[in-house]
Image (cartoon, rainbow, N blue to C red):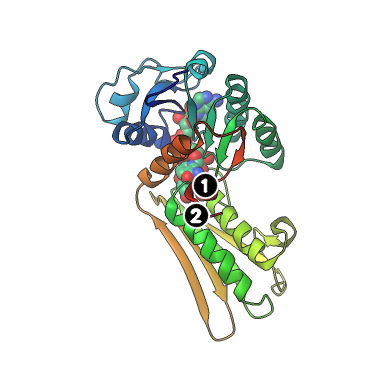
Amino acid sequence: MSEAGDMGLVVVGAAGRMGQTLIRAIHTMPGARVAAAIERPDSAHLGKDAGELAGIGIIKVPIVDDPLPAFAKADGVLDFTAPAASVEFAGYAAQARIVHVIGTTGCSAEDNAKIAAAARHATIVKSGNMSLGVNLLAVLVEQAAKALDADDFDIEILEMHHRHKVDAPSGTALLLGEAAAKGRGIDLADNSVRVRDGHTGVRKTGSIGFATLRGGSVVGDHSVILAGTGERITLSHHAEDRAIFARGAVKAALWARGKKPGLYSMRDVLGLS
Ligand SMILES: NC(=O)C1=CN([C@@H]2O[C@H](COP(=O)(O)OP(=O)(O)OC[C@H]3O[C@@H](n4cnc5c(N)ncnc54)[C@H](OP(=O)(O)O)[C@@H]3O)[C@@H](O)[C@H]2O)C=CC1
Ligand SMILES: O=C(O)C1=N[C@H](C(=O)O)C[C@H](O)C1
């Protein structure tokens, strides 16, 4: 582990959509460097240079498959992979006592409990969306949900993503749902309607509904609709480039460096808590 100077960051899932975007972001942001790049043991990308794959030219960091030696020498990990992988990486980050930034979505309650346990020794920042815009939107959603009575305004959350996305609702939709539930002083799990099909009956007052669209190359669109009688308020965010998530993740790692172990959110990083 380096004591001073640029923060050495391991990018896990380095060949993925976000992995490549992270390599590019680290390259342009002061204070951080790519310490290692990890993919699965059976990945077709092993041995390739992570910078060349990401389109920035050779950075002399080959993609390898063994996280342990990489974590032991690094200051932090940027992780946009898959739930089972993020749980495993959180355990390794705890062993190495380093920063772990987790952007992976679709984690179960059990996965989240394991990540929280790892945060006793690792400094973990986890968020369904690392962008400034979405985290500010969550603050606005909480305020709007608090200001508008549940008897008068129904809350629905609509999201659209590219055709390759594997989890639904998106991590961001759930983050915005949590913000709305907080504003209303209710528990999201007990009040959410995640799917509608067939004869559903009338809408339950106070519920928070989710609708999911998938198609094409959409980076990430989210709208929170507060629908009243005769009027409707829509709070929206449109992600145009994955760089907003990657820059947020690097910023989170730099913020977390030197902080006590624990589980932090992007709201903590951005001072929006
Ligand atoms: N919080 C946020 O701001 C954002 C979160 N995300 C989330 O990030 C995650 C990744 O998204 P995206 O980049 O589009 O997905 P990709 O499928 O393009 O990338 C994931 C990468 O992780 C690799 N991977 C999976 N498991 C392991 C493992 N055990 N060890 C090493 N590498 C592994 C995959 O390899 P392989 O293909 O072989 O499985 C793949 O290369 C998703 O959960 C997504 O929702 C995305 C954008 C922003
Ligand atoms: O899978 C994606 O692409 C994205 N995932 C995150 C989510 O589930 O909300 C963040 C962003 O919307 C892109």
| Quadrant where the image shows the C terminus | bottom right
Instruction: Using residue 198 as the reference point, say whether residue 93 is left or right of it.
Output: left
Image quarter for residue 189?
A: bottom right
Category of crowding for the residue at label 1, using alpha-carbon neighbours closer than 10 angstroms: few (below 14), some (14–19), many (at least 20): many
Instruction: Using residue 124 as the reference point, say whether residue 44 is left or right of it.
Output: left
Residue 196: in sight, yes or no? Answer: no
The amino acid sitting under disc 1 is Met
Q: Which residue is mark 2?
A: 135
Provide residue 24's location: percent of width, then percent of height: 32, 34
The amino acid sitting under disc 2 is Asn
Q: Which residue is mark 1?
A: 266
In the depicted structure, whether residue 17 falls above or below residue 4: below
In the depicted structure, whether residue 8 falls above or below residue 264: above
Provide residue 224's location: percent of width, then percent of height: 53, 66
Residue at point 52% right, 31% down?
258
Provide residue 48's location: percent of width, then percent of height: 34, 18
Image quarter for residue 36?
A: top left
Residue at point 39% right, 34% down?
22
Residue 142: in sight, yes or no? Answer: yes
1 and 2 marks in contact (CB < 8 Å):
yes
Residue at point 66% right, 62% down?
181
